[in-house]
Amino acid sequence: MKHDSRSFQSPFRFLVLLALAALLGGCATQATNVAMVPETIDTTNKHPGTVSIAVSGGSDAMGKIPNENFKQALADAITKSQVFSKVIDGTSGNYLLTVAMSNLQQPLMAIDMTVKVEAGWTLKRASGETVWQESILTEHTATMSDSVAGLTRMRLATEGAARKNIAAGLAKISKLKL
């Protein structure tokens, strides 16, 4: 009996497309605050004052960094590292730390996903005097060993770049003589 090759082509194409979707797919999720908190932060000084935090420039779009998630990760990192004695809600802290995310570079598609995050950090006294200001650029690469799903690698790379940005910013602040 002779088989028509077209009869196998359609189911075979469907299975290949399904397998490809499983490899590249996954849930496109936003960067989470828990995953953006650095494990360790190289601190020089622990400042006795309190700090309020403001974050801008993030996005609630899928695959991006929501302001609230970055702010919570930053607050958790400050508490964990004790760079300041306490994080205060609102604007009543001894210092106001503002972080403005200005650039998020994510690849469209890649095996190794490298994401870059640039954020402008500003630390002011409650009086409004600027103590320190700097733009910090960090990057992180997620590979196939982190996840075979492309969108998951993108999220992991985004969280890693944000985590490194938080660690770098707090390390620089800890070196200040306040």
Image: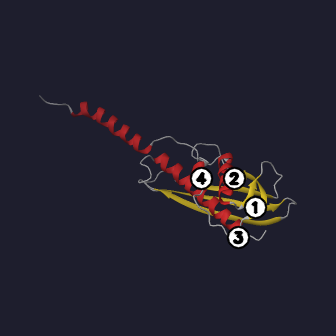
Which kind of residue does numbered mark 3 sit on? Lys
Q: Secondary structure at mark 1?
A: strand
The quarter of the picture where the C terminus appears is bottom right
State the count of labels. Answer: 4
Q: How is the image coloured?
A: secondary structure
Tell which circle, 1 or 3, labels the residue nearer the N-terminal end.
1
Which residue is the site of mark 3?
Answer: 175
Q: Is residue 128 visible?
A: yes
Which residue is the site of mark 2?
Answer: 75
Q: Distance of mark 3 from mark 4, alpha carbons?
A: 22 Å
Looking at the picture, does residue 18 appear above or below residue 175? Answer: above
Q: Distance of mark 2 from mark 4, alpha carbons?
A: 11 Å
Which kind of residue does numbered mark 1 sit on? Thr
Which residue is the site of mark 4?
Answer: 36
Q: Is residue 108 visible?
A: no
Which residue is the site of mark 1?
Answer: 122
- Point 83% across, 52% down: residue: 92
Which kind of residue does numbered mark 4 sit on? Met
Which kind of residue does numbered mark 2 sit on? Ala
Looking at the picture, does residue 106 appear above or below residue 131? Answer: above
Instruction: Look at the numbered discs 2 and 1 and tell me whether their residues touch, using CB distance below 8 Å.
Output: no
Say few, some or many: other residues with alpha carbon within 10 Å of mark 3 (under 14 / 14 to 19 / 20 or more): some
Tell which circle, 3 or 4, labels the residue nearer the N-terminal end.
4
Tell which circle, 3 or 2, labels the residue nearer the N-terminal end.
2
Q: Between label 3 and label 4, give the one nearer the viewer.
A: 3
Q: Distance of mark 3 from mark 2, alpha carbons?
A: 18 Å
Task: Point out the residue furthest to the right here.
Answer: 127
